[in-house]
Amino acid sequence: MGRPGEGRDNNAAGFGEFELIARLFAPLSDAAHGFQLTDDVGLVPDTDNRVCVTSDMIVAGVHFLPDDPPDTIARKLVRVNVSDIAAKGAQVSGLQLSAAFNRDRDVSWIEAFASGLADDLALFGAPLIGGDTVRSPGPDSFSLTAFGRVGPHGLVRRSGAQPGDGLYVTGTIGDAALGLKILKGELGMVPLGRRQPLVERYRVPTPRHAFGAGLGAFASSALDVSDGLLADAGHLATVSGVSLDVSFDRVPLSGSAARLVKGNADLHLSLMGAGDDYEILFTTSTDNSDALAELAGASDTPVTRIGHVGTGPAGTVILRDSAGDVLTVPSQGFRHF
């Protein structure tokens, strides 16, 4: 065996994010607790599989804009972690924060960050139980490690989708991507009433924690949509060893998004590969439709069936229009490398 990177370009951009993980870090994991790093959470050893853990990092210029309000940055940090936990059928119980503040940040900025953090810790009922804080010459970078209580049905893994299952998504897709485009000035002048909800979805996503609490009762597989609907569908399909068929016309949009993409087919199609939605994408047997409807109603969570699980090559995701023709999306999702 050669050393890591031997015989190829040593630039990390020559890898993909998931290739880096699979080649260099998955061998350090295990099947029982770390799942070879194929899922969004792991199980904490010696807890009878009742405690799960996840970590997410956000970096200025990558996951948020450097001039975003500091309270919204903190809230986004909390919510992307809560979203991971919720998509596994668990409930967040505590968090650890590692913060690298740019050395030019003043105390008032950090106070506003802490205020936003406090608001969301209270909202989700999870205390801060540790971490680390440093000053950095580089961009603001924050990492949160979240612990979760696993539900009575166990974790909902990425690996359980079965041919014939329905494919569902909570909420709406594409708001955050449009919000980011608005903030970057890529969509021209957008009326305030249409602009604000989209920007809000980018800065402060809504994790489906109430819906996630009951997900384990019927979901065969699940993950949250962070990299993009099609990219994350591909992750689920790969780990489950199945294919997925997605109906473009069924993918739900908010009213603000629908008005903004009306008449712009390319922009609409691009939302299928947009990230930062933090909705839950899951599969379940159609026999569970009553239980699904009951949970959706009880948690006040919109849920839409957007496709089904197939028997094609593992990891294949096919997006079809209303006529059944295959659509091609320029980018299926965000890549770090």
Image (cartoon, rainbow, N blue to C red):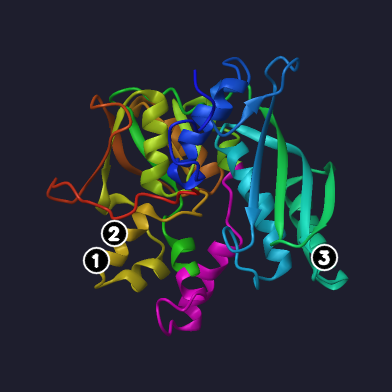
Residue 265's tag is 1
The magenta region covers 181-209
Q: Do the numbered discs 1 and 3 sit on residues whose CB atoms are within 8 Å?
A: no
Residue 110's tag is 3
Q: Quick one: 73 or 48, which is closer to the camera?
A: 73
Q: Residue at x 55, y 37 (%)?
A: 87
Q: Which residue is mark 2?
A: 269
Residue 200 in picture, x, y percent from top left: 57, 67
Residue 131 in picture, x, y percent from top left: 83, 43
Residue 304 in picture, x, y percent from top left: 37, 46
Label 2 element class: helix
* 320 left or right of 259 in image: left
Cα distance, mark 1 to mark 2? 6 Å
Whether residue 299 appears in magenta in the rendering, the answer is: no
Quadrant housing residue 206 = bottom right
Quadrant housing residue 61 = bottom right
* 290 left or right of 28 in image: left
Cα distance, mark 2 to mark 3? 39 Å
Q: Residue at x 30, y 63 (%)?
A: 268
Which is more foreground, mark 1 or mark 3?
A: 3
Whether residue 200 appears in magenta in the rendering, the answer is: yes
Residue 50 in picture, x, y percent from top left: 70, 21
Would you say residue 153 is visible in this rendering? no
- Please tell me which of labels 2 and 3 falls first in the chain: 3
Q: Do the numbered discs 1 and 2 sit on residues whose CB atoms are within 8 Å?
A: yes
| Mark 2 Cα-neighbour bin, 10 Å: few <14, some 14–19, many ≥20 | some
